[in-house]
Image (cartoon, grey):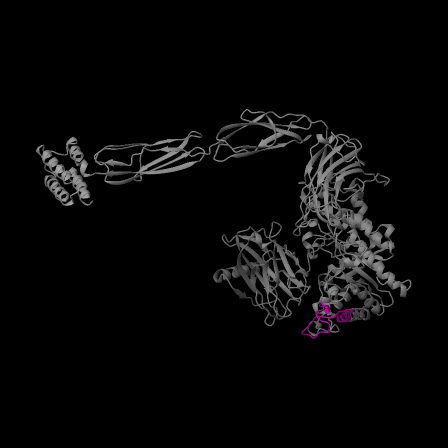
Amino acid sequence: MNKRFKQILVLVFAVVLFLQQVGIIHKASAASADGNYLLKVQTTGGNQWDGAQIDTGASGLNLVAGTAYTFSYDLYTPDQDVAGIVLQTNGNYNWIKNTGALSAASPAWTSYTATYTYLAASGGQLQFVKTGDSGATDAKNITYYIDNFVVKDATTGNVVYTADFDDQSTDGFAPNGNAALSTVNSIGGATTPTTNPDVLSLPSIKNTYPNYLMGSIIGPYYMQDPIMSVLKAQFGVVTPENATKPASLIGTSASTHNVADLSFNEADTELQSAIDNGLKIHGHTLVWEGQSIPWLNNAKISDSDPTLSNPGLTAAGAYANMNDYINAVLTHFDGKFNASTQNIISWDVVNEAFGGTVRDSSLDPKDWHSYLKATPWLKATDDNYVEQAFKDARAAEPNYNVLLYYNDYSMDDQNKAAAVRNMVKDINDRWAVGHPGKQLIQGVGMQEHNGLGTNPNNTRKTIQMFKDIGVKVSISELDISAGTGGTQTADQKTAQAAQYARLMQVYTDPAFKDTVQRITLWGLTDTNSWLSSGSPLLFDGKLYPKDAFYAVIDPAGYLAHYNAPGKPPGGKTSTAAKGTPNIDGTMDDIWKTTSPIAIDVTQAGNTKADTIMPTATARMLWDDANLYVFAQVTKDPSEPLDKGNANPWEQDSVEAVVDLTNGSTAMYSNASGHYRVRYDGFASVDAGMTDNQGIATKMTSATTYDETTNSYTVEMQIPFIQITPAIGTQIGFDAQVNDAKAGARIGAFAWNDASGTAYQDLFKIGTLQLVAGSDTVPPVTTDNAPTGWQTHPVNAVLQATDAGSGVASTYYSLDGGAYTSGNSISVSSEGIHTLRYYSEDLAGNKEAVKEKIIQIDLTAPAITMPDTTKVLISDALNYPIGVSDATSGLDSVSITLDGMPASNLIKAAPLSLTLGIHPIVVTASDKAGNSVTLTSQITVYMDAAHLNSLIQCGIDNGFITKPGLVNSLLAKVKQVQAAGTDAKKAGNALNALSNEVSAQSGKGLKAGYAALVLSILKALGNK
């Protein structure tokens, strides 16, 4: 299918998706999705999570949290009865799309589409994983294919990522769990990459190192050309990447639970391919917690042998399975490949049985059993299972021609390496009693999955450990990750190459020529590495050699021309002033001129959750010969000073890390040192500087401590070597406090290193600049007092800093008073206050006085109103309101009468207000924000006694237009008043008055006035 036809097919597919929006569309052919290249995913670990993943960040899909995306892709599996393959997030495990049950009974490519809103909690990867069911799907390894993976912005429709794999790369996808990824152009076979045409003309690694077995790995990807041609040109031995692991060999025994029912087809094919091409084989691995089958070693749950419905095994049952399995595997491969010519030269019998780190206080290398991980094998048996596995293997390989190895990771960790050494020696010593001159464990595999921070000196020490007990060493799974998302910067490529060169110099050191047997790189190309995101190998995906390849070929030559990158930016910086103290554990006057740094960065990996951080600081000085460190530590009162642990870093102590090259390399050298002093003066050195003859410098120290306050002081003198110090010189530096309690370290705190790995990675420490000793710059003081008016008391805090000698004291004056030493001022009274302050440093420099105005108003405005609460309707109203604020002043005033705005002098003419209650509301706020609301009311009324005033208002305002009417009205008013309390007479009199007013309305009386009088008379009549 040509590219043009592919474009048409994709267009048709897009139209169908547009019409159907959501759903599944089956394609007609299972040959491929589009006739070009696609991604092949082979799961190998028997785990649900095995599969493929892609980063969601900038190195991958570059998704934005809160955005809805549409994901579409084609998927096909040739396997029968797959419960489902799901596209999910790795953070919150949200399913984006589940294929549902799949079967190859009627094979077809299927297109899937789904919309999902990506969240911050969704995590850093999208993953294709097995759905899982109640059957054996999780343990079943499957193969499936992905093509045309497209991500679009669901709102705009813009394509944000496309992976069609047509460039024969994995397009950012990497293995998740245990899986192999490759690109293929048909379902039946792996792709033939567009390769470097000169790859077979390159120098040969195996020819460069003829005294070593130089190796790689074998698997389906490596059996094709030109990959196999490169393998046999470069290497002499291969390790099956997955085919000889238990999960790959179990075969039909997965259902029968019988270790005799093994499936060797894939392994036999891979090994035969390697042997046909002249390669020797190292077998990997017989006993391992990973890529195994649970029923081999179910943790014992009863004291009797189990039935299939009760799969828990006794120790005897698990050991029997172990023996049967090891015997079956070794017997098969020996019979097939070692019958006439020894093609299989060695085996990893037990893999990764140990845990532990160099600073794990719960473990003691002398007690190697304490390092055994809680694997299913350990739970099912006991802590002799490693030894028993080797005995079973030796029984199957009695002639000692096939070397038996123990293999493990992180073997540059000196404590773990020591524990493995002690185990090997212990087991071999016991074996030698009955088998003089023979070793049960003949070799140790150091996996060496490294990074740029790995210290080759530690690797050297580890190899020496095993040389000392007379066993072989193999570098069994070498790679060096240096990159993210399958890409590398130029600096990462060269730094990776330099690290390969340094390590190769260690592995091939003539001192180890009889110890190091094999050096195996765990893969050939970056794109097919299990750590492909870190681009860890010697070739890119098209078999072009990287710098790392040439560094392996000629380590010394590469390093001679290598310019290492410097320490990454972002670390803390401080200064050391020039001066020479007395080393006696007490603070000399010269220390008082220095500025302390806080040792307050928690190393989470070394600190328990409930640990109370000690108060700790350090000061630094220097002279032409030495660096000086003065540390003060005060623990929590509930934690006595402690030295109960045998490990010095697990005791109450102070550490200093010094790198005179300030980050020329992350590794320790003769110009860097790691020093430690316990509270009571005991000193230890993890790595010390040496002169050019290798003579170590001597660190001098002194301490004082007080067990009543749980505090101590450490003073160190660390000689300069390899440099001549001067003003402006920068060196790497860090200070750390180890906090111990009841014989164990409960916390570790540093000035800069939050990782707790500065003991092996100098890029984790800060920078110290050497400066002149005199301090001429005054401190700088700031305050946190608020500006503007405040409605509450103010607590002002003064903060002084001084980068030179340090702050001695801070002084302040309030409202012209005397200056007082302190940095906290409480102001509670109302009014405008003036705060003046300054600081002095330890060198006597005085800061210019600063001034801050603090304004406080605690009282709301005052409101005054007249006592008047009643007024005759016939009287005029004059109602003055007073509003004032004596402190910050008025900001706003609101006055309403009957809900309508009014002034602060409420006036009303006679007859202008209606009878009844009239509310008054006054609200006032001041400039500080204080506010008050006051309410009152005026009652407007009329009674019989004052009816004369009502008539008088009519006269005064011209409302009575007929002069002769006045006397008549007043006469009737007089009758009302004369009625007094006689309701009947009063009623008759009011009616008479009302009748006359009504009759004269619009005649002798103006109509409006007449209506008002009538309403008043009516109100009186209702009383």
Query: Which quadrant would the N terminus be assigned to in this image?
Result: bottom right
What is the chief secondary structure element of the magenta stretch? loop
From which residue to which does the magenta span run?
A: 296-322
Instruction: Report the residue that reaches farthest toward the right.
Output: 436
Query: Which quadrant would the C terminus be assigned to in this image?
Result: top left
Percent x, y of residue 628? 76, 35
Dividing the picture into quadrants, the one containing residue 709 is top right
Q: How many marks?
A: 0
Q: Nearer the viewer, residue 950 or 247?
A: 950
Verify whether residue 306 appears in magenta: yes
Q: Nearer the viewer, residue 800 or 192?
A: 800
Q: Name the side, left or right, on which 342 lies relative to 749.
A: right
Residue drawn 53% across the image and 57% down it: 116
Residue 203, above or below 691:
below
Q: Is residue 283 visible?
A: no
Dividing the picture into quadrants, the one containing residue 1015 is top left
Q: Name the side, left or right, on which 683 lies relative to 777.
A: right
Verify whether residue 319 appears in magenta: yes
Percent x, y of residue 887? 44, 29
Residue 238, above or below 413:
below
Q: Is residue 265 visible?
A: yes
Q: Nearer the viewer, residue 298 or 389?
A: 298
Percent x, y of residue 228? 75, 60
Residue 993, above or below 183:
above
Dividing the picture into quadrants, the one containing residue 920 is top left
Percent x, y of residue 376? 72, 64
Instruction: Report the residue that reaches farthest toward the front.
Output: 981
